[in-house]
Amino acid sequence: MNIVLNRIDLSTILVAIPEHATQARNLIRYLNQHPNATAEDIGRHCSIANVSDVARKINPLLLEHGLFIACSVPVAPRQFHYGNKPRQYQWAIHLLPIEAANDETYRQQKAL
């Protein structure tokens, strides 16, 4: 589930991120304002060339707050002028579920 953080949650998370991680801070701020932003838009507004690398490095800190950054393939991808489709991904901040979808299955197997 995509989320938008309120100002207090956002500041709490930004405090946990090291000061030298400017790209990570910019990515979190931008995704908070623009959920499902494409890698192209993120690169243009945040000067991040490799979004997946920044997300991979910052996700361990976000997991402590029950959040993570992930990408998905857009339902209707953009097309270039000549009709070919770019490999475009949408990035967003997601909330971790409190319980995994298969937790009940594992509980039942453990009981046996």
Image (cartoon, grey):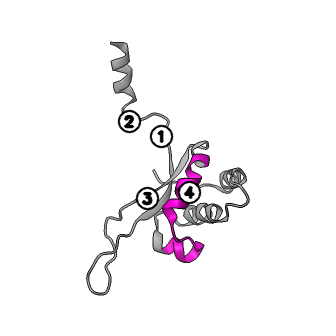
The answer to whether the residue labelled 4 contacts the one labelled 3, judged by CB atoms less than 8 Å apart, is: no
What is the secondary structure assignment of the residue under circle 3? strand
Q: Report crowding for label 3: few under 14, some 14 to 19, many 20 or more residues within 10 A (C-alpha).
A: some
Q: CA distance from mark 2 to mark 4?
A: 23 Å
- The range drawn in magenta is 41-61
The residue type indicated by label 3 comes to Cys
**Badge 2 is on which residue?**
101
Q: Which mark is residue 4?
A: 4
- Which residue is at the far left? 83
The residue type indicated by label 2 comes to Ala
Quadrant location of the C terminus in the rendered image? top left
Q: Which mark is residue 97?
A: 1
The residue type indicated by label 4 comes to Val
| Magenta stretch: helix, strand or loop mostly | helix
- Sequence-wise, which precedes: disc 2 or disc 3? 3
Residue 2, percent from left and from top:
48, 54
Residue 55, percent from left and from top:
53, 57
The answer to whether the residue labelled 2 contacts the one labelled 1, judged by CB atoms less than 8 Å apart, is: yes
Q: Report crowding for label 1: few under 14, some 14 to 19, many 20 or more residues within 10 A (C-alpha).
A: few
